[in-house]
Amino acid sequence: MRTTSHRRVSAAGWRRPASLLLVAGLGLAAASCGSGDEEKPTAQGSAAADAPVTITVGCQPPKSNPKERAGWDEDVAAFQKLHPNITVQSKDAFPCINPDTFQAKLAGGTQEDVFYVYYTDVQKIIKSKQAADISEYVGSVKALNDIRPDVQSVFKDGDKTYGLPRNNYNMGLVYNRKLFTQAGLNPDSPPKTWAEVQEAAKKIAAIGPGHTGFGEYSAGNTGGWHFAASLYARGGSMVSDDGKSSAFNSAEGKAVLENLKQMRWNDNSMGSKQLLQWEDLMRMMGSGKLGMMIGAPDVVQSVNNDFQGKFEDYGVTAVPESEGKASLSGGDGYMFNPKATPEKIKAGLLWLEFHELTPGKGQFNYERAKAQGRPVGLPIPDLYGDSAPGKEITALRKEFATVPVDHFTPYVTPQSSITNKLEPPKAQELYAVLDVAMSAVLTRKDADIDKLLSDAASKADKILAKNT
């Protein structure tokens, strides 16, 4: 998965090498129990009466992020006070997954008892039997049924469960509210269709030299990634249902490229500099001269933190035309070492419930985050939708918000009608193939879209054939 969270930083700022990597804001015990529950370990399905057990847990914030590390350590102490028989041994890693060693650790069974994963790795790990089946124990997680079904399904294979989510997000359309106002557009009513994006882009580009209405990637696998985001929003698919062949050479795929070609060459609203990749669009957005780009809400955080932008200048809406269809989604979570004993699995579930899934605790301790000067108010992770824990988390974000929450309303409002759709198998290889088509339509006025898609499909089919 790629969004800001996947490629650079997560919504928490340290969990993963930067997807959407971004992309990427839950509640279990607190939603079901009263405020005094923290004084009653047994009320949390406690193992307090059990024998002592030690668990290793991956993805402790690194020392280079002292605020979040201090919060993590504080949470470990609070958790161990609730469950005196459980010792949590935190494993510091940055990034939390090192591609050079991750597969070797899985193959050798040397990963932590509770190990961190990206959504895109989960099914492969399950099929390789590199994670424990926790179905027998996961029912102890009180708000399990409140987690969005499409989110929890990431960690399921049939009726078996192999992990729990920590972060979930989908792509959106990030836009510059100041430029919208300057161009005579209503920043509280951003585009809902690609035709509206096209019109808004023309008006923003017309503000003056150096202004770009809409920016798009087309190199370093990022072009193919954004092609998938636009394709899903139009109702298309990257691969067939069985994953054995490509499916993007379709009316929806053609519409993605035709729209970009129109904006680039007929409207001149995308600027002349192309072959853009990862940081290019972030830098342009931070400069105040780019009107719109595809990205998860944490793009705004990255633009603010790393590219001299200001939170108040930006808004996020759903990817145009995705309502009632799908949005490219991503996230991360935790799975369990297949060597873990039942006692370790039970203890690990208690920790995940406490730290990753409870409103007001762990990653959702927004009061602490605000006191530490960290941004509060981004609408991710979204694990619960409109269920009771989700509403509680939303209320806490508003109560302790340090960013303009209303600027994300156009993104949040339609989410109940949008299905999260994961990246395809062999995602990075397919993205590299589609970079060719994306770069062609943005650099060649005479680009033949039908041929580009046909050629890309032929290459993609060969890649997918190796996956079967």
Image (cartoon, rainbow, N blue to C red):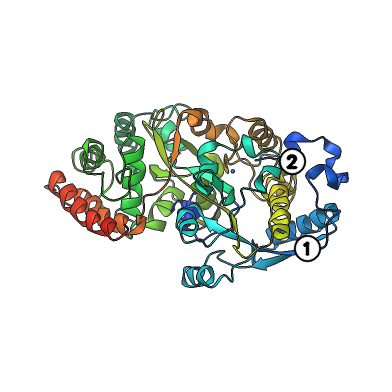
Q: Earlier in the sequence, mark 2 or mark 1?
A: 2
Q: Quadrant of residue 238?
A: top left
The residue singled out by tag 1 in the image is 53
Callout 2 environment at 10 Å: few (<14), some (14 to 19), or many (20+)? many
Up/down of 94 relative to 257, above or below:
below
The alpha-carbon separation of the residues under discs 2 and 1 comes to: 21 Å
Q: Position of residue 79 (x, y in %)?
A: 79, 54
**Up/down of 28 relative to 166, above or below:** above
249 with respect to 155 (left or right): left
Of residues 62 and 133, the one drawn nearer to the viewer in this rendering: 133
Q: In percent of the image, x 86 and y 39: which residue is there?
A: 36
Whole-percent x, y for residue 457 in the image: 21, 50
Quadrant of the frame with the C terminus: bottom left
Residue 55 in the figure: left or right of residue 404: right
In the image, is 442 to the left or to the right of 208? left
Query: Can I make out residue 106 in this image?
Result: yes
Occupied quadrant, residue 249: top left
> Could you tell me residue 404's position as x and y percent?
59, 37
Q: Is residue 63 visible from the viewing direction of this image?
A: no
Residue highlighted by disc 2: 29
Amino acid under disc 2: Ala
Q: Nearer the viewer, mark 2 or mark 1?
A: 1
